Amino acid sequence: MRTHFPWKRALHSKAVWFSLMVTAAFALTAVLGPWLAPQDPYRWGASQADLPPVWVTDGPKAPQADFPLGSDRYGRDILSRLLYGTRTAFFLALLSVPLAGLVGTLVGLTAGYAGGKVDTGLSLLMDMIQSLPGIMFMVMLVLILRSVLSPSWFHGLIALVFGFAAVAWVSLARLIRVQVMVLKAQLFVEAAVSVGATPWQIITRHLLPNVSHLIIAWVINNVPAVILIEAVLGYIGIGVTSADSDNAFSVISWGGMFFSGRSALNRSPLMVVIPSVSILLISMSCILLGDFLKGISRPEAQ
């Protein structure tokens, strides 16, 4: 089996270029955030609270050039917090999506190829997880992990990673399981079995390459999902750090900006608007790139 990727079509696709540029900007912002931020995002002061963005000149306070997007009620620079929050979102997506993809791939390949009781048991496990309300199950896992781990921002991030991965892998596993069940009935797999290929060789050399386009599309489509989930959980106070903990200001995330900005929409609407626009751009780029990958030609037997 050999896969054919339409490189010429990709290079001439505006959707692909838009997706790549947004993704590259997202990654560069995450890496260069500390150098791009005009202020220390943790520094606060009452005299700098609720500053308007530089283009608003008729408010109760005059804008300051050092705070291009204004400040929040604590006097912290919104632009700097947005840049630092990009690092948190990028780190969260970089850990949780590949972890969920790895688990889903392993389970899907095993269930689809083994069949029988193995398939029945794994399918039952997937049914049990998928029957639970996804967001509520994730919240429960995050809260349980936080009660076990120390209340640090790093452990809060790890709790979100495992909470997302524990729920998200099921959709990929089901997708791969069905595709593998179709592929293993094809002649090229039967030919590999007839010449003495082991199950490991069949899975790694014949089945995995032919479901790789599904895995890539799934990963791309779930990057904005995990970022959005972090924002939603942060909005209700269950983000990287708990809203009522001593570490509430020890890490910056878009979800934390939503939580801080929900009570200050009249004074600092950009605290909610800017992260929302960022999530929208990332979602659009991933959806467009995912749709392109879904539309490419499927693997063909050689």
Image (cartoon, rainbow, N blue to C red):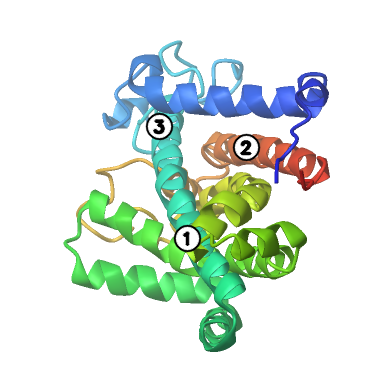
**Label 3 sits on what residue type?**
Arg
Task: Give the quadrant of residue 49.
Answer: top left
Q: Nearer the viewer, residue 30 or 80?
A: 30
Residue corresponding to mark 3: 81
Task: Give me the disc on residue 145.
Answer: none
Is residue 104 visible in this depiction of the protein?
Answer: yes
| Real-space CA distance between mark 2 and mark 3, rounded to the nearest whole angstrom | 18 Å
Which residue reaches farthest top? 65
Task: Looking at the image, tell me whether mark 2 or mark 3 is earlier in sequence order.
Answer: 3
Q: Nearer the viewer, residue 61 or 276?
A: 276
Q: Is residue 245 left or right of residue 83?
A: left
Residue 173 position, x and y percent, is: 58, 67
Measured along the vertical axis of the image, is residue 5 above or below residue 136?
above
Say which element carries label 2: helix
Q: Is residue 89 left or right of residue 74?
A: right
Task: Give me the disc on residue 200.
Answer: 1
Residue in view at x 33 percent, y 61 percent: 159
Which residue reaches farthest front? 195
Residue corresponding to mark 2: 282
Residue 264 position, x and y percent, is: 50, 45
**Label 1 sits on what residue type?**
Trp
Q: Is residue 45 left or right of residue 186?
A: left
Tell us which disc is closer to us: 2 or 1. Answer: 1
**Label 2 sits on what residue type?**
Ile
Residue in view at x 19 percent, y 65 percent: 149
Residue in view at x 52 percent, y 70 percent: 110
Task: Looking at the image, tell me whether mark 1 or mark 3 is earlier in sequence order.
Answer: 3
| Real-space CA distance between mark 1 and mark 3, rounded to the nearest whole angstrom | 48 Å
Tell us which disc is closer to us: 2 or 3. Answer: 2
Measured along the vertical axis of the image, is residue 144 above or below residue 243?
below
Judge the density around disc 3: few (<14), some (14-19), many (≥20) Cα neighbours within 10 Å: many
